[in-house]
Image: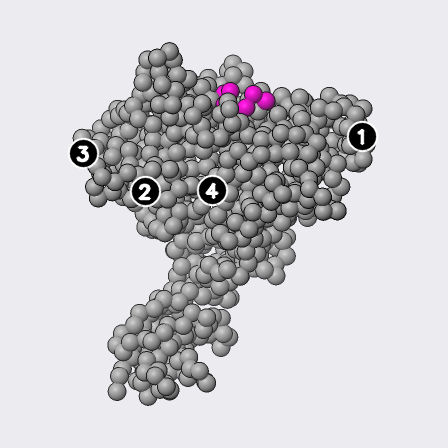
Amino acid sequence: MANFVIQGRVIDRNFQKGASSVQVEAWDKDLIINDLVGAATTDDQGGFRIEFESAYFQELFADRSPDLFFKIFQKGELIRSTENAVLWNVAAGETEIGIEVELKACPFPTAPGASSSSTPAPTKPVVREAPQPSGKSLKHDPTRPAVPTEPVLAIENIQGNILSGFNKDQQTLLFLRVDNQSDFRRWLGELIPFIATTAEVLAFNRLFKEIRRRRSAETRTVQATWVNIALSFRALQLLTEDDETLRSLACEFPDYQQWADDLAVLKADAFKDEAFKQGLQARSIDLGDPRDAEAGEDPEAIEGNRHNWLVGGPKNEADVVVIVASDSPAELAAEVARIEETIYSGRTHNGKHANSGVTILYKQQGATLPPPLVGHEHFGFLDGVSQPGVRGRISEDEHDVLTLRQNPQEPLDQGKPGQDLLWPGEFIFGYPDQDPLAAEVKDPGVDSLTGEKWDGNKPSTDRPKQGPIWAKDGSFLVIRRLRQDVGGFHKFLADTATTIGTTPELLGAKLVGRWKSGAPILRAQTKDNPKLADNDCANNHFEFVGASEPIPPQPDPDKPDCLVEDARCIDNDPTFEVSPGDALGAICPWAGHIRKSYPRDDESASINPNLPPGVPKIGEVSTQTHRLLRRGIPFGQPYYPPNDPDRTIDSGNRGLVFAAYQTSIIDQFEFVTQRWVNSPGFKETGTGHDPIIGQNNTPGEQRKRTFKVTIDGKPQELSTNNDWVIPTGGGYFFAPAINALCLLTGRKR
């Protein structure tokens, strides 16, 4: 008779600590009736052992091995069943398992007389976007403090990809040219009901995360397909060029009636951002892209030059980009097909053919990379770790914040640890922005549309200064199609590591500032730490100059002997290094990608024309005026080194669709590109270029980029003439609010 031994551990999901004194029952799942085959109570570490013989389960039909699932009880109450995840055909002998649960009551009592700071507890992982708490009053949730001075965001009016992010594994971008203004106006109006809002996307994202939290697994229970749109300056000019039409439309919409006779604030020409008005291809050379061909040069041989772009160049500049994103490849294809049909085979409501007035210039597919690269970009590094948090509320409830305040050390000024909260005017027009002259990051600036002092949540009657009146609740969108030379990048790492006596992995971590897992090198100085990388409460908890401090569990004010169980972060895992700070750039080089593109608390005397003399040119306060909300996605298949490079041709068609929202292309995207990543003098003279995305088109330098790193205490100056990230298309666009689209098309909501 066969003997079976099931041993394992029950883990409290919230604190990643063994769940002691809970009862574990093992059940054999059968066609007719399930059989209890054994039970045990967990020890202090959550461990258990259950033994049984084959006589304990019914051997019906061909079933000669048990199909096991488990029930977990705490004080007699069922808190978890794995019946939807059966272990089929368990073999005789020993089987090891692990089961995660959510304990109720007080999981970690403090020692009598001990403070919570002296009580060790492992790191508590938090999902990348925390869900709405279930059955809990907002005012009793410590991650949702009262913030009456923060603005109420018009989430029903703002497009959904801007503040919430689609977070979909599949995307298609349709780049369109406008051929006929009146037909385009009608087609755009018909598309408006399909455009997702922040309210819709935020509600879905929170529902998705809540289901994943409850079921402890990715499921396909809820799925969605979203559409957003953005228009070029030329497209907006076409929609606002006729004075009488514009005045007539403004009179029909209450939000714009008072401005009907002030055409200057209704026309697209009211935008003050010259970069947006000129377009990406006109600014390409200023961004460091390869220069135009000179006499005797073959223009087609200069990859990355705007004349060779797949879309967005002088001869194929897009007026519109439609972003379609979905959880399902099939649903994505169906929605793209529907939109394409409206473009080429559109019909009016009475069935007559209707021209769309647009032509598809280019279709770009994007998708999350397959395992083991999920969430990573093609070079192999985890992407999108450091995003700014956004201040603001999503209702009149002063506790209903957009970004949860999960860092108990900075309960009003950070989301997760290391994620500074920024005023929404940095990303959405019509709200307070960041003040580069403020004493602290938390101090609000002026209204990003009117330039006037923010007047609470009262509707503004001030005349707009940065764009048309309908720019409120809209955002600029920068898109760059970036091809990645993955083979060339990894060859550089391998060859250079051999030369300077280190490993390709460590060298790559120095150049990026993070290991491939996403663990910051400031908290994992000599080797990767995937566990740290997977923890959202720890993987961004550092500054470049100041040292970080552990975050212990928080005491429950209602139960002094307990540690509170909520969504606030814990970062005190003893296996995680604490960042010591690195003012000299010995650990994370000043040229490291994450430091170049977001210098955090670094200070520098680099030129910033927007600050008067005597004010630090770059510091933690002014740095936050140059942030971006990134919404990119990879394209192309992963790179696999060929067995025979001489006989295997790789297309090289892989990279990143970089997409980012902001309210000043000049002061945000272009500033970061020109004055930080491309500037060898930032942070200090001799720092070098950003080795990952930096470019150098200085005449006579053959695109040579230099960057300094310190390996084993020895400074090394490295260089390359090869670009590993090459621009191949893109554009500058504006994502209008739903009300603005209605105004521009005459479509009623």
On the image, numbered disc 2 is attached to which residue? 639
Which comes before the other along the chain, label 2 or label 1? 1
**Quarter of the view holding residue 324:** top right
Instruction: Tell me the chief SS of the magenta region.
Output: helix
On the image, numbered disc 4 is attached to which residue? 365
The C terminus lies in quadrant: top right
On the image, numbered disc 3 is attached to which residue? 498
Magenta part of the chain: 277-283
Which comes before the other along the chain, label 3 or label 2? 3
Q: Amino acid at mark 3?
A: Thr
Query: Distance from label 3 to label 1 (Cα)?
Result: 70 Å
In the image, taking residue 379 as reference, residue 569 lies left or right, namely: right
Q: Say if residue 555 shows up in the picture.
A: yes
Which comes before the other along the chain, label 2 or label 4? 4
Residue at figure coordinates x 48%, y 47% from the top left? 170
Closer to the eye: label 2 or 4 = 4
Magenta run includes residue 282: yes
Closer to the eye: label 3 or 1 = 1
Q: Amino acid at mark 4?
A: Gln
Q: Position of residue 213 (x, y in %)?
A: 50, 59
- Circles 3, 1 touching at the beta carbon (< 8 Å): no
In the image, taking residue 106 as reference, residue 492 lies left or right, namely: left
Query: Distance from label 3 to label 2 (Cα)?
Result: 22 Å
- Callout 1: SS: helix
- Circles 4, 1 touching at the beta carbon (< 8 Å): no
Q: Amino acid at mark 2?
A: Tyr
